[in-house]
Image: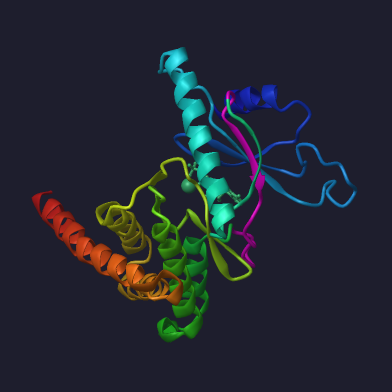
Amino acid sequence: MTDHIVAGAQKHLTGIPLSVISQGAEALVFKTNVHPYLTSPSLANKEAFIIKYRPPKPYRHPKIDASITKNRTIGEVRFMSKLQKLGVNAPAVILADLDNGIIWMEYLGTELPNGDVSSFKNHLWYLERNKEPSFCTDDDVKLLCQEVGKLIGKLHLNDMIHGDLTSSNILLQDGQPLLIDFGLSSYSGMPEDKAVDLYVLERAIDSTHSVYAKQYNEWMLEGYEQIHMDKEYGKQGTKKFVEVSRKLDDVRLRGRKRSMLG
Ligand SMILES: Nc1ncnc2c1ncn2[C@@H]1O[C@H](COP(=O)(O)OP(=O)(O)O)[C@@H](O)[C@H]1O
Ligand SMILES: [Mg+2]
């Protein structure tokens, strides 16, 4: 199954070595050591790059499929460029082939000592496994969760919604969190949309780090609040935080009601 998709990608990427690092519902993600156009010796075989490929979906009408692929690719590239401009940590786009659903981007994230991808999820698991049970009071973890909250706060203060916030879509590079995976991202100033973004992450943390989830989520919201209180955003920041946090209570309540109904 994957072989045939890899062959499809390879058709548009002749001579580029591709190793699959992830296969999702929408895209195949490759790691490569080749830059699309630079050939300087410092780059050759040293640096790593990511190629995200959205293959054609056989169950969609070809014309509709081509237009969906193109739009999602444009959307993701545009969102990423905007993040770059705003200084919100995320990979830089290097090149995009919009018609073929290909995005070539920077490879980010420092691997964990055990070789795992340094996602926020793996990082927390790693700490949970390798530290004392009392580690939850550890300042490093607290700071990290707060940094994640600040990162999301920055995104929301610019009226940008991630749309798929999970602890796998947050990577860590040199101890600093960064965002990836903008296939479902959008723009909105509505507190409700921001609250849903936060709620999705809260639930993701609940399900992957049940023991410490409550603490992690609290720290994250602290960071989210802190960035809103930053002088740079003035009174608007405070107002926005209050609105989102009020909405978050509503969204949580709705979520609980829904889960009670089964
Ligand atoms: N720029 C990047 N640098 C390093 N790893 C990445 C990068 N982009 C994606 N990945 C890896 O590939 C995985 C899948 O990519 P993602 O964009 O999240 O696609 P999907 O929509 O399939 O989840 C990520 O969880 C991460 O491990
Ligand atoms: Mg993802």
Image quarter in which the N terminus is found: top right
Which residue is located at x 53 percent, y 59 percent?
88
Q: Position of residue 136 (x, y in %)?
A: 41, 81
Residue 169 in sight in this render: yes
Which residue is located at x 50 percent, y 45 percent?
79
Which residue is located at x 51 percent, y 22 percent?
56
Q: Position of residue 80 (x, y in %)?
A: 55, 47
Q: Please tell me in which quadrant of the rendered image residue 197 appears.
A: bottom left
Instruction: From the viewer's perspective, tell me whether residue 107 is left or right of residue 65.
Output: right
Instruction: From the viewer's perspective, tell me whether residue 199 is left or right of residue 16.
Output: left
Specify the principal SS of the magenta part: loop
Q: Position of residue 44 (x, y in %)?
A: 85, 46
Q: Is residue 185 above or below residue 147?
A: above
Instruction: From the viewer's perspective, tell me whether residue 170 is left or right of residue 105.
Output: left
Q: Provide the residue span drawn in magenta.
A: 99-116
Q: Position of residue 40 (x, y in %)?
A: 88, 46
Q: For the view shown, which residue lies furthest in the right direction? A: 41
Instruction: From the viewer's perspective, tell me whether residue 212 is left or right of residue 69.
Output: left
Query: Viewer-proximal residue, 132 or 225?
Result: 225
Q: Is residue 85 shown in magenta?
A: no
Q: Is residue 209 above or below residue 262?
A: below
Q: Is residue 67 above or below residue 20?
A: above
Q: Please tell me in which quadrant of the rendered image residue 59 appears.
A: top left
